[in-house]
Amino acid sequence: MAALWFIRGGLAAVLAVVFCFMSPPPVECLVRHYKFNVVMRKVTRLCSSKPIVTINGKFPGPTIYAREDDTVLVKVVNHVPYNVSIHWHGIRQLRTGWADGPAYITQCPLQTGQSYVYNFTITGQRGTLWWHAHILWLRATLYGAVVILPKLGVPYPFPTPHKELVLILGEWWKSDVEAVVNEAAKSGLAPNVSDAHTINGHPGPVHGCLTRGFSMPVQPGKTYLLRIINAALNEDLFFKVAGHNLTVVEVDAAYTKPFITDTIVIAPGQTTNALLTADLKSGKYAISASPFMDTPIVAVDNVTATATLHYTGTISTTPTSFTGLPPQNATLIATKFTNSLRSLNSKQYPARVSLEVDHSLLFTVGLGVNRCKTCSSGNQLVADINNVTFVMPTISLLQAHYFNIDGVFTDDFPANPPIRYDYTGKQPSNMQTTKGTRLYRLAYNSTVQLVLQDTAMIAPENHPVHLHGFNFFVVGSGLGNFNHKKDPEKFNLVDPVERNTVGVPSGGWVAIRFRADNPGVWFMHCHLEVHTTWGLKMAFVVDNGRGPEESLLPPPSDLPKC
Ligand SMILES: *[C@@H]1O[C@H](CO)[C@@H](O)[C@H](O)[C@H]1NC(C)=O
Ligand SMILES: *[C@@H]1O[C@H](CO)[C@@H](O)[C@H](O)[C@H]1NC(C)=O
Ligand SMILES: *[C@@H]1O[C@H](CO)[C@@H](O)[C@H](O)[C@H]1NC(C)=O
Ligand SMILES: *[C@@H]1O[C@H](CO)[C@@H](O)[C@H](O)[C@H]1NC(C)=O
Ligand SMILES: *[C@@H]1O[C@H](CO)[C@@H](O)[C@H](O)[C@H]1NC(C)=O
Ligand SMILES: *[C@@H]1O[C@H](CO)[C@@H](O)[C@H](O)[C@H]1NC(C)=O
Ligand SMILES: *[C@@H]1O[C@H](CO)[C@@H](O)[C@H](O)[C@H]1NC(C)=O
Ligand SMILES: *[C@@H]1O[C@H](CO)[C@@H](O)[C@H](O)[C@H]1NC(C)=O
Ligand SMILES: [Cu+2]
């Protein structure tokens, strides 16, 4: 009998291990194993084919499923002729900076033939996040969703949906994306915009190529949870479903106060969970993703991606109902949406905004122009934070920090703009920036208030700024220049939205607060890939606190070397 129990127990353990490799694995797995083979695959979109970098041949890539408190182990093996690294966007990575992923910030990239196990535990987060390549522009095709379910037995703070669905928005270039970037680097000018937007990898029918887009079947009367992700490289997007409203319940894996809207605005890097009730009887309704860009001189891809909401029983020849799309410069619609976001701030999910501030920082974000001998135009468009155009190191900053390697970075990043001027008004005639690998140092558990101030150098523009390693609270925003006397009086310190990526409004500012409770080196950058490439990036170095629980773990033995 005992032997039988032992065998049964043993069998259960074996099965559990086997099933934990399934995708998605059953709920009993506290450690989720995934295998990511980075491989090339030929794909046809917009009636034209090209080889792309994928995970396991899938585009978009596989969804990672986990529960809050689970440990996730992803073994990545690089079989492509590019250096690769993967970032788990929005995962806090408490003490596990080695698994964050940005190349040359927290790790050296995986070279062809190399492998690395990303090992992290999901703490205090539930909702939708995503993963993407964090080197070159490979994230154009190397991305997928991360679905974090609440702990077992803990319900959502909203009615349980009938079904859940990931809708991941992207951009598609007919050309090889690395060729697009290299061409721009040679000229010093802006890279070509994409040829179409995508929803779950498909543009849907567009002028000149009438292929079918993604289709989402729904049953009348049922409610669905849409996990919407903006994986586009360079464009903020409007998201709409014809004939239906959406109830926003979560952004960036933090619950919000529910609110109803017919249009969602989502910047690259951001995620939004929204409930959709299929409250019509039948029919087909367009789901659309179209660009939001309120700087007239910046070119965007204006090809809308469409998918279809398809009521069961509706015959496929039924014409699709469309909805009016906001014009690309619809700032008011975008602002109304972002101003409606609030933390849920319930007893179970309180908004822990820190009321005291140890570091009060003002960072300008914007563009500039430097002379460039190798560029065919003689100049190079650049971007900067506080006039510093970030220079990437050749070994990772986290290694340099952990092993005290000198000469890789300095920790003198300016807390304020080096020259005070009317940031959103008349610009200095000198549009040059300085170059440097400069970090800002924070003591463990210190509190930061950071005002991100757009500049009008070349042109004011909306910059979705992403901070690795932390969530922050968006305590205020406004147009024009931040006024450090008047504006803080209007800050929301009660229920500000909590997120990891925030749009700095074009010609305006946004104020965020966070607590430096995660030791390591944490990248902060514009999530418009073109601006990151131009240098709109920096990093915070957060020192260890007292004892092992407040210290960065040692690097894993398989950490790739440079
Ligand atoms: C993952 O990291 C934890 C420490 O956080 C360590 O105990 C564990 O052995 C690691 N697992 C693997 C497979 O490397
Ligand atoms: C960029 O666009 C220009 C103009 O349409 C085109 O001539 C060029 O080939 C494009 N570059 C790439 C790399 O696709
Ligand atoms: C969406 O909500 C608004 C405001 O609550 C309402 O006026 C509108 O009729 C709703 N639209 C649909 C399609 O339900
Ligand atoms: C989209 O942009 C192209 C190129 O700039 C332009 O020719 C076209 O008219 C635009 N289409 C729409 C619908 O705005
Ligand atoms: C948006 O763009 C259109 C067309 O270029 C222009 O007519 C309109 O004035 C712009 N609206 C705003 C609010 O800038
Ligand atoms: C930025 O730095 C460059 C190079 O030192 C300098 O010439 C320029 O005046 C600075 N601009 C601003 C706005 O700080
Ligand atoms: C961090 O600081 C807060 C506020 O001063 C304090 O309540 C908390 O205990 C500190 N946490 C740690 C881990 O030191
Ligand atoms: C790949 O990464 C290694 C290590 O950083 C570097 O030496 C090499 O030049 C990179 N290869 C390419 C093609 O960029
Ligand atoms: Cu930007």
Image (cartoon, grey):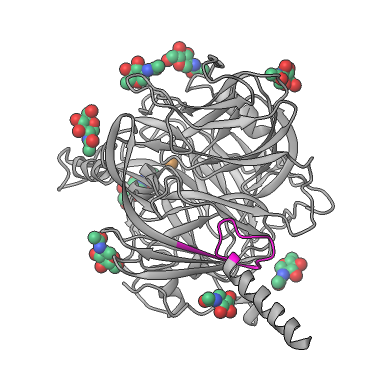
235 w.r.t. 65: above or below? above
26 w.r.t. 226: above or below? below
Residue drawn at (49%, 52%) of the image: 62
Q: Quadrant of residue 552?
A: bottom right
Q: Position of residue 335 (x, y in %)?
A: 60, 29
Q: Position of residue 499 (x, y in %)?
A: 62, 48
Q: Position of residue 432 (x, y in %)?
A: 30, 45
- The stretch of residues the image draws in magenta is 19-35
Q: Quadrant of residue 13?
A: bottom right
The residue lying toward the viewer, choosing from 125 and 4, is 4
Quadrant location of the C terminus? bottom left
Q: Position of residue 119 (x, y in %)?
A: 53, 69
Q: How many marks?
A: 0
Q: Is residue 460 visible?
A: no
Quadrant location of the N terminus? bottom right
282 w.r.t. 149: above or below? above
Is residue 21 in the magenta section? yes
Q: Is residue 265 visible?
A: yes
Dominant secondary structure (helix, strand or loop) of the stretch shown in magenta: loop
